[in-house]
Image (cartoon, grey):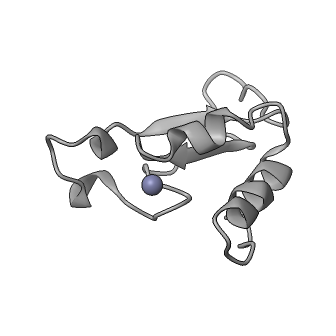
Amino acid sequence: MLPPCCHVCHLEPDQSPSDGARSDFVLVYFADAVNPPPGWVGHPAGAVWFCGEHAPLGADRKHLTSHSALREIDAALGRLPRRLRP
Ligand SMILES: [Zn+2]
């Protein structure tokens, strides 16, 4: 499991104001997410972290694959698509 880091703003819990809504990180599972087998350690495929502020961007696109969803989010924000983390 990767530590929380917002796909949109790259915020990490350490950097967020403790009293702000952005301190709530959400792991959004997209359409291509699979449940890892028991005992498996790592970051689940198709799951992406968002901070509380940007979680709706991901939640609205849960029906898409993570690749499509992140591209859409990047496009919606008017920035160039980024590569997915390995
Ligand atoms: Zn964010």
Of residue 62 and residue 4, the one placed in the foreground of this image is 62
Q: What residue sits 75% from the left and 36% below the top? A: 30
Residue 83 location, x and y as percent? 74, 72
Left or right: 69 in relation to 22: right
> Where is residue 66 drawn, in percent x and y?
78, 47
Residue 59 at x, y = what percent?
A: 64, 33
Q: Residue 61's image quarter?
A: top right
State which image quarter holds ligand 1.
bottom left
Name the residue: 21% across, 43% down: 20
Q: Please say whether residue 43 is visible from this viewpoint.
A: no
* Quadrant where the image shows the C terminus: bottom right
Q: Is residue 79 above or below residue 6?
A: below
Residue 84 lies in quadrant: bottom right
The extreme top residue here reads 38
Q: Residue at x 83, y 31 (%)?
A: 63
Relative to 15, say whether 30 is above or below. Answer: above
Return the residue nearer the eye: 25 or 34. Answer: 25
